[in-house]
Image: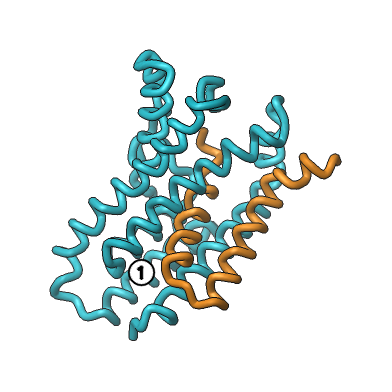
Chain colours: A cyan, B orange
Amino acid sequence: MLSSPVRRGSPRLAFVAGLLAGGTLTAAVLVVVGSLVRAPLPMPVRLAVVGVALIAVLLRRLGLLAFRLPESRRLVPETVFRLGRHLGPLQFGLEMGTGARTYLPSGLPYVGAVAVLMVAPLPPALCAGAGFGLGRALMTASSLRYGADDGWHREWRDHARTLAGLTGAAFMVSLLAIPLWSGMP
Amino acid sequence: MPLTRLSWHPVTVAAGLVGTAGAAAVAGLPPALWLTMGAAAGFATSGST
């Protein structure tokens, strides 16, 4: 659960800035690594790799495939708030925004990472990274506006299947439309 | 449920993402598509915090 320091005023802005910075940082690293990985592969093969990743994650979600995705099995320690009123939330957001420093209970970020790795030029990759940070910030913003109690998170748990379907649909519509509008074969 | 709470309900937010993705797909805006793809992935991890 997010602590109160990231829920109000300018510390919250620092937290969101950290989320955006973390997401774009991860995306930039993926593009650098991807430029080496994708170099010998023609575009159809790279798209096929993204498709395989998407199908594998879908099958895993449906319980038809069982495998563990790599994740940092830890929570961001609350000790980061010792860094100060703004630096603490910034660090907290940065760690959450990278997607590599705490739990990732959904398979979608992995497919997104493969897509960035295999096909994204730098500007679109940064859009995807910033989007990841914004998506995580949406949780903070909406839970805050929903109410001060734990209601939003309770609703999340109660509607987990619906939410998995909706976020999966938003993800897939975007992902599948990208090659159509980007001139990829 | 009050309208304010309903507006910020996780299902409402997720449905908004679906709408945004659909609009970006119809409009043919690759940067918006990448952004929405990332946002959907980020919001999907909301259970982790």
Picture residue at 57% right of the left edge, 36% below the top? A140
Residue A51, quarter of the rendered image = bottom left
A50 above or below A91?
Answer: below
Left or right placement of residue A33 versus residue A97 in this view: left
Image-quadrant location for residue A45: bottom left
Picture coordinates of residue A101 (x, y %)?
34, 35
Asked whether, in this view, residue A53 is left or right of residue A153, the answer is left
Q: How many neighbours does mark 1 have within 10 angstroms: few (below 14), some (14-19), or many (20 or more)?
A: many
Q: Amino acid at mark 1?
A: Val
Q: Name which residue lies at 56% across and 20% down.
A: A4
Q: Quadrant of the N terminus of chain A?
A: top right
Residue in view at x 64 percent, y 36 percent:
A143
Residue sitting at 54 percent across and 48 percent down? Answer: B43
A169 and A136: which is toward the camera? A136
Residue on which disc 1 sits:
A50
Taking depth in this image into account, of A46 and B14 the one nearest to the observer is B14
**Could you tell me which secondary element the residue under label 1 belongs to?**
helix
> Along the line of sight, which residue is nearer the eye, A78 or A131?
A131
Residue A77 visible? The answer is yes
